[in-house]
Amino acid sequence: MTATSIKTAIPITEWKLASWQDYEMCRERETQERVKLYYYQNRLLVEMGSEGINHSSISDLLTMLFFIWFSQKTKQEFTSLGRCLLEKSGHSSAAPDIVLYIGADYPTWSPGERRYIDLNRWRVPDLVGEISDTTLSSDLDEKKHLYALLGIKEYWVIDVVGERIFAFQLQKNNQYQECRVSQCLAGLPISLLEQTLSRLHSESNGSVANWFAEEISA
C-alpha cells in the first residue's frame, strides 16, 4: 500500500486499506474542509468534521456536564479536549468528539509543536466518546476496538437517533465491557445522562445543564 492509493482526504466514508504514509498524507493535506481522521490496523477513515445542530448541542452540553459534575461531586481537576486528534505515531490515530483528562497531567501545546495530542509523549485520555448521528455502526465496532487498543479506560457512544448512551469500561483483558455507571465520573449513572439528553427535545442545552446540576445536588 502506497500513499498514491489514497486520492483524497475528503471524505473516505468507509474504512479503507491504507499505509501510515497514506494517513500522514491526509493529515498534512492543506484543505479548507475540516475532517476527522481515524487510523486502525492499516485502515483509514476520514469523516467530515463540520457538525449539525444536534451534534453541536450535545457536544457542548457534555462539556458543561463535566464541569458541573467535577465542581459539585469530586472537586477533581479536569481538561476537556473534544475533537482533538490523538495520534500514536506509526500505530493508530483518532479524533473523538469527547476527550477527557482527569487530573493535572494533561496535554499542553507550545509554539512550533504540531497541533495534535502525541500519545508517544502524553498519556491517553481517561475517557473518550463519539456522538453518533450517522456513524453508529463504526462507533460501536472499529472505533471501539481502536480505543481499547490505545488503552483508554472508558468509552461512550451517544446514539442521537436512538437516544441511548453505550458506555464501556476497559477490562484486564484489554476488551471493553458495557457498564451502566461511569467509573471515570465516579458513581454517575448512565441512565441519568440519558434522561438529561432526552430533555434537549424541548429545552436549550443551557437549561438542560441547569436541570442536571439540580439533580445531582439533590
Image (cartoon, rainbow, N blue to C red):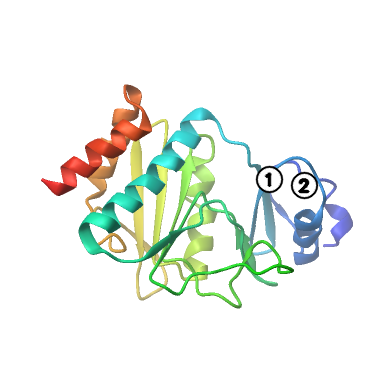
Where disc 1 sits, the SS reads strand
Q: Which residue is drawn at 82% across and 62% down?
A: 1
Question: In whole angstroms, how far apart are the C-alphas of marks 1 and 2?
Answer: 8 Å
Q: Is residue 74 above or below residue 13?
A: below
* Residue extending farthest left: 218
Q: Give the residue type that dot 1 points to.
A: Val
Q: Give the residue type that dot 2 points to.
A: Ala
Place residue 35 in its image quadrant: top right
Q: In this view, does 64 lie above or below 104?
A: above
Residue 21, disc: none
The residue lying toward the viewer, choosing from 49 and 9, is: 49
Query: Residue 58: horizontal and vertical position, in percent?
Result: 42, 38
Residue 187 visible within the image: no
Where disc 2 sits, the SS reads loop
**Left or right, 91 with reference to 204:** right
Which quadrant: the C terminus?
Answer: top left
Q: Which residue is drawn at 33% across and 47% down?
A: 65
* Residue extending farthest front: 111
Mark positioned earlier in the residue sequence (1 or 2): 2
Query: Residue 115: horizontal and vertical position, in percent?
Result: 67, 61
Between tags 1 and 2, which lies in front?
1
The residue lying toward the viewer, choosing from 193 and 208, is: 208
Query: Residue 42: horizontal and vertical position, in percent?
Result: 69, 63
- Are discs 1 and 2 less than 8 Å apart at CB? yes
Place residue 207 in its image quadrant: top left
**Left or right, 45 with reference to 131:** right
Query: Residue 98: horizontal and vertical position, in percent?
Result: 47, 52
Residue 35, disc: 1
Q: Which residue is drawn at 50% across and 52% down?
A: 141
Q: Which residue is drawn at 85% across and 59% down?
A: 3
Classed neighbour count for the residue bearing mark 1: other residues with Cα under 10 Å, few (<14), some (14–19), many (≥20): some
Residue occupied by mark 2? 9
